[in-house]
Amino acid sequence: MACITGYWASSVQIKCPLCMKKFRRRPQLLVNTGFRDMVEHFKSISERDEEVIRVKPGEVPCDICLVPKLKAEKSCVVCFASYCQLHLEPHQRVAPLKKHQLIDPMSDLEERVCKRHDKMLELFCREDQTCVCLMCLKDDHAAHDAVPLELAVRERRGQLACVTSEMNEKENSRSRSIKEIKHSADQSRKASEKDIADIADVFTALVVSRERHQDELIEVIRKKQENLQKTAEDHVTQLELEVAELRRRRSEMEQLLQTEDHLLLLQSCPSLLPAQTEDIFSNGYYSMPTSTSDLLGLSQQSYVATVKKAAAQMEKSLSNEMDMLIHTVKLDCCDVEMPEGFATAWIPPRDKLMMIQQNEAVDVKLDTYTARYSLIVSEDGKQLSFGPGPPYLIDWFRKTFQLQDYVLGKEGFSSGRFYYEVDVSKSRVWVLGVAKESVQKWFLTTTSPEEGCWTLRGSYDRCQSYFPQTWMNVRLQRPQTVGVFVDYVKGEVSFYDVDARALIYSYSGCAFIENIPPWKSFLEYLVGASVSRKAKIYPFFGIFNDNFDNTLVITPVAQPT
């Protein structure tokens, strides 16, 4: 209306701005009620559509709605369908439908139906720990202890509540431990900073003391040099006077020798020439100074050697004390005080062997069926000794070593790392290590890497490796317990003296992966298998000399504290 009246107000002629129909006078504008009703009708429809809740991503849609899908209000466990508020009305009005069980909307109602019997999962089987329907109790779960889902849920909730409570307690305990550890670490950091500052002050004081003593020594040497210089100058002055006097008397005597006056010569000679028994410089007028050699010896005396010797002794003593202190501090670093509950749970390793003992120890037993007939394996598989074995013919049918007194471990390894310890104190000559599964037991004479063995041989006070063949003297302390460590991935085999906590010998670059025989390779090729595989390696043991006192004992891996 504002648009039309404005148009007419600015126009000379009165006409319709759309169809250009002219009017003789301005018509009276009225409300189009029909158009108004139609606009209001569409407006009410739009407002009603806005009130309808359409489904959003992640929400359960109504299974009855076409397009647009509305949000489901309830799901029926009998109809296996979800309904919006409009389509839920029959379940609220029709008597048979009122008996249906309605639950909150769920999108996985098909998962609540037994796949076999197409029935609702209403029970929980305690023996099989699974949800079942009524028909399942007559088939696979007959005579099983089954309870309604509600009861099972209550029991499970109770269990979860207990576990949650325990986890909460552990969480709180761990949180307190974390705070205590952080507080302890902070206190340790502050104490360490104070120690570092104090140590710096001590060394600074030591340097200051050294510089003070250095200045004192230099001052003493300078004063002594000044005194020596003054003494030397005094002696030089005295000697110069004596030289002048000698020259004067020598000149008078030369003049007297040249005179022709005999009377003057005889009269003047007694005053110039003393008696023969008297020394020319023995009278009190002259005093003999210290000899030149004494002065030179005094001036050439050096204190550098003495200072160097004293400094070397001080340096050695201080270095030894500092080395011992550093070693003590390193050991103390492994004894950090932990909160209660953690002190016994983990012991920080103080060396590589302790770390291996803590993480890589395995339980090794001897395989009786690989032992030579002259060896006896104890019932627990932990001890090897000499003794009358089975008859040779019986032994011939077993996978035993035929030429040497060897035996393998019962379990093989084809990955990772493992470690075991053997007491060798009761054996004079022994062999320890690992061997491939494919080792030739019938013909094996030398335990070398070429034969598939990586071993260490002990004999009295020596140890010998076979790659290369080297003897290692251990006369200072004969190994009582030997630890064998294998890293399959790196291809390393190491032997440790457990008591001395020292490495005896280590093989590197061991070829544990082996190629299989051609005939087997051809068969595996036909079936599409790989032609190479990781070989299993077994712990390897041996004793010699047919001495019945010789014994090897596999001991539990020590856990040092």
Image (cartoon, grey):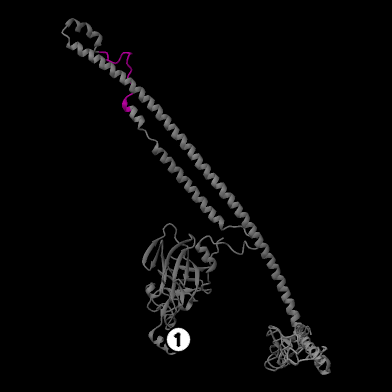
Answer whether residue 498 is magenta in the image: no
The residue lying at 70 percent from left, 69 percent from top is: 168
Indicate whether 99 appears above or below 532: below
Viewer-proximal residue, 552 or 452? Answer: 452
Q: Position of residue 446 (x, y in %)?
A: 37, 72
| CA neighbours of label 1 inside 10 A, class few (<14), some (14 to 19), many (20+) | few
Provide the residue span drawn in magenta: 277-293
Q: Is residue 369 visible?
A: yes
Viewer-proximal residue, 260 or 518? Answer: 260
Which residue in the structure is indicated by mark 1?
A: 529
The residue lying at 37 percent from left, 24 percent from top is: 231
Rendered image quadrant of residue 7: bottom right
- Amino acid carrying mark 1 in the image: Ala
Q: Main secondary structure of the magenta part?
A: loop
Viewer-proximal residue, 208 or 332? Answer: 208
Image check: 292 left or right of 115?
left
Rendered image quadrant of residue 289: top left
Q: Position of residue 350 (x, y in %)?
A: 53, 60
Q: Position of residue 307 (x, y in %)?
A: 42, 39
Rendered image quadrant of residue 391: bottom left
Indicate whether 331 appears above or below 1: above
The residue lying at 54 percent from left, 56 percent from top is: 331
Which quarter of the figure is the N terminus placed in? bottom right
Q: Is residue 125 visible?
A: no
